[in-house]
Image (cartoon, rainbow, N blue to C red):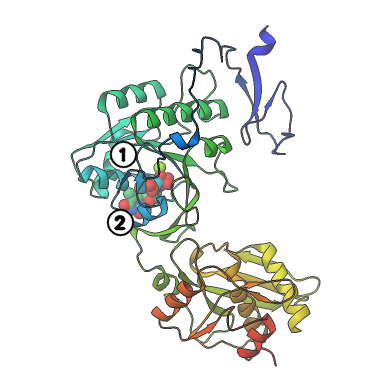
Amino acid sequence: MAKDTTRFVCQSCGAVYPRWLGRCTTCNAWNSLVEEAAPRASAGKGRPPAKAGAAKPIGEIPADDVVARHQTGIAELDRVLGGGAVMGSVTLLGGDPGVGKSTLLMQALSGLARKGKRCLYVSGEESAGQTAARAKRIGAPEDHLYVLAESDLGVTLDVMRELEPVAVVIDSVQTVRAPELESAAGTVSQLREVAARLVDKSKRDGVTTFLVGHVTKDGSLAGPKVLEHVVDTVLAFEGERGQAFRTLRAQKNRFGSATEVGVFEMTQGGMREVPNPSALFLAERPRGASGSVVCATSEGSRPMLVEVQALVSRTGGGAGRRTATGTDAARLAMILAVLERKCGLELAASDVFVNVAGGLRVDEPAVDLAVALAVASSARDRPLDPSLVAFGEIGLAGEVRSVARAEARAAEARAMGFTTLIAPDTTRTVAEALRRTDLIR
Ligand code: TYD
Ligand code: MG
């Protein structure tokens, strides 16, 4: 029977194998299989019989359409969460080390504690003293905010039972361990167990729970495909190295839109909200330089102006390189093909670099038209009118397609002092956009 006591679990997707393999055949990750103790075969036994009539016709069930929320007082965070942190919800916050996850969540708990709500910060990574030092730095209140340096799940749950906090941060979920399982902290079986028990606790007692999750080098949450399914909300905290500002995005949200973006700036005293990100992203825009175009993006409910930059330069020989930073590389290839075939621009023998200034990521197709204009402007070495804003999706036929929230984008552009708009309702094709800006005849 000893054969069945261990199994091999892919740490990237959670697939289970009876023996070790060099590569997971489910998600193709290399060297991702780790030997773990098999769960005891007791599942299902000893379960009480289901009550008769447990299922009800849908019309007889009162709908939970009004969810109770806690306002953390950090407006950007509350907005990304869908209007505050839902009571009894579990939110996973992922991000690179050093991006500011601990800082942001300590500020969120501080906001709640300041309103007299009891909060618990559980740190498996840092000592209570280190956590307290961070709390001081961001000006946390002295009362109602408790710190526990612990990595044992059982102890953590005991403390929660005794303290009855309304909100808890687990920093990080990868460092917490259920001692009943033999596998190491951070393995898939541990993550699954730890998350399941915290979710259960959160739902049962209405505790608002935040889990901090580490991110691997390729930007995915380490291990937790498993986690993403059990939590209510997944937030990604991102920022470029050496840049002070950070974006917070909802990737999944059972209680709100999954397209909201919050913007923060890391300061000496913690994360500061950026209520007017357009001004921040445009602050260092070069005036009168070719290859620079302002785009009105709108991921989520708030429009934002960002600067799209392009640099087109002749290669020494051979096919040109294409590099996209902050936008989609596959869409860049498509846009370049449209510029060549539909607008007569010669780009094959050039390197093309496209960058969203300030380290922001823009994933929506509405950025296409700004990318096309920036590339054409650099290729022709002709600066565009500095009061111009562009947005619109580009189709394979070279047409400019309409995008969501066009009016809100235009309004943001006007509010920031831009007077010329190149947008889907006035511009039907990419060639027309280039003619209007004198980039082609
Ligand atoms: P931290 O919240 O520890 O990041 P994470 O939990 O995501 O790893 O913050 C990391 C960095 O932020 C750290 O290098 C110090 C810096 N920092 C500030 O600039 N200002 C502050 O007020 C705090 C608390 C940290
Ligand atoms: Mg941390």
Q: Who's the residue at 35% across and 65% down the image? A: 275
Q: Which residue is mark 2?
A: 268
What is the crowding at mark 1: few (fewer than 14 residues within 10 Å), some, or many (at least 20)?
Answer: many
Q: Quadrant of the C terminus?
A: bottom right
Q: Who's the residue at 46% across and 25% down the image? A: 177
Report which quarter residue 31 is drawn in: top right
The numbered mark at residue 434 is: none
Please state which of residues 254 and 34 is positioned toward the viewer in this rendering.
254
Q: Earlier in the sequence, mark 2 or mark 1?
A: 1
Q: Helix or strand or loop: what does disc 2 sit on? A: loop
Please provide percent x and percent y for residue 297. Answer: 51, 69
Q: Who's the residue at 40% across and 70% down the image? A: 280
Q: Which residue is mark 1?
A: 131
- Any atom of ligand 1 within 8 Å of the CB at mark 2? yes
Amino acid identity at mark 1: Thr
- CA gap, disc 2 and disc 1: 16 Å
What is the crowding at mark 2: few (fewer than 14 residues within 10 Å), some, or many (at least 20)?
Answer: few
Q: Quadrant of the N terminus?
A: top right
Q: Helix or strand or loop: what does disc 1 sit on? A: helix
Q: Could one spot residue 416 in this view of the protein?
A: no
- Image quarter where ligand 2 lies: top left
Relative height, residue 315 to residue 141 (above, below): below
Most distant residue in the top direction = 1
